[in-house]
Image (cartoon, rainbow, N blue to C red):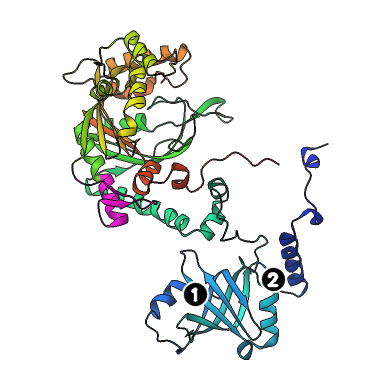
């Protein structure tokens, strides 16, 4: 027996009453020769165009303008001789439709009352008028069904849960203005990012999502297999190594807005699949990239709010303007633990400090990793205003140049906003000999069970050996940038985040 035969499909009798009634209406329409899902319907203007054209039309006025308008029915009131409905189009614009017995006749009016439900998409043809109450309306001559909704819309008085909104984003977009606004926010932000890069003469490139080996970040990859090449492949965790190849080839300023995949945990600020912007600039350094990152964020704020001050979904204002605060990673650890901690503090000393803090210590953590975990534990939640955390451990930064003055420290910063990491930036390591040593160390950690450790990428090392210019690099999560601009969690800034399949 095939798997298909094992699937138990619901019968008509099993369906809830509302679904059953609407399916019966669909069948009735077909029986009468009415197509419930036509290939096309009349549409001469959008609702927003009509709203704009007649925004100053006086109360109880007629225009003589006959238009065919489309929209989803989100309100419907049927009385004896006069029926009202509210049409809504994709951008949220609404317009009233009126059906008068005198205008359409009894057959059309009865069909409207019996055939059309909340959620249906319709085309209404008629004259643009204002009602006696001053409501801009289309006074119908006729209507056509564009798509029959077989499921009722959620009740306005019972908002959908976050889980339901995420799982059924299509319904969320129909009923909730905030969802529609969020969906339109992302392209505005991405457009701003591209404009900032273009002004600074960066070029946009595309690099592979399927890679022979994972690299460019310390993260656990998703593994796949190519039948054509008979070999394992990995979904990229970062585009860094390919973008650096571009700089070696003479593309001195490059960026990519890309999808990355990391086989790690999911929470309010992490998603297994996420959008990232990465850029590299020849003859720049970590300071250059900090300035670039601030420009990217502030220009995005200007693009969506007209100001560096943005208003979050809960009404709180967040000021992203000015020159941002800087703190040292190790100074923050020392302040938070009330112990003197530097890049030279031993692993054993750090373990003692972590134990005092009640932290659970992973035995695979190296010295720098434990220092970073202590920082996350004691300091990150306090970093609400934009703050560059400067100077990370060398042993956790295998692709980063060592600090020019401080031993054990890499020229790396992380940008924190609202208590989460928004971006990271480096002075890039360009010495192929040292880079090989760093990657060999990573491979050793991988052999010991560290699933996030990088591999030795011989082709990348070969590219470096041709001479890689001094450069700075940065990466910023696009989803997290939207979090910083809106105050929303990552599942609300991603249109369709990954969710587990529903179970019966």
Q: Position of residue 186 (x, y in %)?
A: 39, 51
* Left or right: residue 7 compared with residue 200: right
Residue contact at pointers 1 and 2, CB within 8 angstroms: no
Residue 56 position (above or below residue 227): below
Tell me the magenta residue range. 296-322
Reply yes or no: does residue 325 show up in magenta.
no
Q: Residue at x 21, y 15 (%)?
A: 407
Q: Position of residue 62 (x, y in %)?
A: 46, 89
Q: Position of residue 284 (x, y in %)?
A: 20, 33
Which of the image's four quarters has the C terminus? top right
Which of the image's four quarters has the N terminus? top right
* Residue 417 seen from this side: yes
* Residue 40 seen from this side: no
Question: Which one is closest to the eye, mark 1 or mark 2?
Answer: 1
Q: What label sits on residue 35 in the rendered view?
A: 2
Mark 1 lies on residue:
95
- Given residues 70 and 444, the one toward you in this image is 70
Q: Position of residue 378 (x, y in %)?
A: 33, 25
Q: Residue at x 66, y 88 (%)?
A: 105
- In which quadrant of the rendered view does residue 228 lie? top right
Q: Residue at x 75, y 70 (%)?
A: 30
Dot 1 or dot 2: first in sequence order is 2
Residue 160 position (above or below residue 147): above
* C-alpha distance separating marks 1 and 2: 25 Å
Label 2: how many Cα within 10 Å (few below 14, some 14–19, many 20+): some
- Given residues 209 and 292, the one toward you in this image is 292
- Is disc 2 placed on a helix, strand or loop? loop
Q: What label sits on residue 157 in the rendered view?
A: none
Reply yes or no: does residue 315 show up in magenta.
yes
Residue 52 position (above or below residue 260): below
Total marks in image:
2
- Is disc 1 placed on a helix, strand or loop? strand
């Amino acid at each position: 027996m095939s798997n298909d035969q094992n699937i138990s499909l619901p019968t008509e009798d099993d369906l809830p009453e509302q679904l059953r009634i609407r399916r019966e209406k669909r069948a009735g329409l077909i029986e009468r020769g009415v197509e419930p899902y036509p290939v096309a319907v009349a549409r001469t203007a959008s609702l927003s165009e009509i709203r704009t054209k007649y925004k100053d039309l006086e109360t109880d006025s007629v225009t003589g303008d006959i238009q065919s308008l489309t929209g989803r029915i989100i309100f419907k009131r049927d009385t004896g001789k006069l029926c009202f409905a509210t049409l809504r189009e994709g951008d949220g614009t609404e317009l009233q439709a009126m059906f008068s017995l005198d205008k359409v006749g009894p057959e059309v009016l009865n069909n409207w009352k019996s055939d059309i439900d909340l959620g249906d998409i319709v085309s209404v043809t008629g004259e643009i008028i204002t009602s006696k109450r001053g409501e801009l309306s289309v006074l119908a001559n006729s209507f056509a069904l564009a798509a029959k909704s077989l499921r009722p819309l959620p009740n306005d008085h019972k908002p959908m849960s976050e889980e339901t909104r995420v799982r059924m984003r299509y319904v969320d977009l129909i009923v909730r203005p905030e969802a529609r606004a969020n969906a339109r926010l992302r392209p505005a932000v991405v457009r701003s990012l591209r404009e900032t890069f273009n002004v600074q003469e960066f070029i946009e490139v595309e690099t592979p999502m399927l890679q022979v080996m994972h690299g460019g970040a310390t993260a656990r990859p998703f593994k796949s297999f190519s039948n054509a090449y008979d070999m394992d492949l990995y979904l990229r965790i970062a585009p860094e190594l390919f973008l650096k190849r571009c700089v070696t080839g003479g593309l001195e300023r490059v960026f990519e807005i890309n999808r990355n995949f990391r086989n790690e945990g999911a929470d309010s600020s992490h998603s297994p699949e996420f959008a990232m912007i990465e850029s590299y600039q020849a003859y720049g350094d970590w300071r250059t990239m900090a300035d670039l990152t601030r420009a990217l964020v502030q220009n995005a704020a200007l693009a969506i709010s007209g100001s560096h001050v943005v208003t979050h979904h809960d009404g709180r204002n967040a000021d992203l303007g000015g020159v941002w605060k800087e703190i040292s990673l190790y100074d923050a650890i020392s302040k938070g633990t009330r112990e003197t901690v530097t890049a030279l503090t031993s692993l054993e000393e750090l373990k003692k400090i972590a134990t005092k803090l009640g932290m659970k210590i992973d035995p695979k953590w190296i010295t720098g990793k434990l220092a970073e975990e202590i920082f996350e534990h004691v300091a990150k939640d306090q970093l609400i205003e934009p703050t560059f955390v400067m100077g990370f451990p060398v042993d956790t930064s295998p692709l980063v140049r060592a600090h020019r003055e401080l031993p054990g420290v890499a020229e790396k910063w992380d940008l924190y906003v609202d208590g989460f990491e928004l971006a990271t930036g480096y002075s890039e390591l360009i010495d192929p000999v040292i880079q090989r040593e760093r990657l060999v160390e990573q491979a050793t950690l991988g052999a010991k069970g560290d699933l996030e450790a990088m591999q030795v990428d011989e082709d990348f090392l070969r590219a470096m050996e041709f001479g890689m210019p001094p450069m700075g690099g940065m990466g910023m999560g696009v989803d997290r940038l939207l979090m910083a601009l809106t105050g929303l969690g990552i599942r609300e800034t991603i249109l369709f985040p990954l969710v587990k399949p529903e179970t019966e």
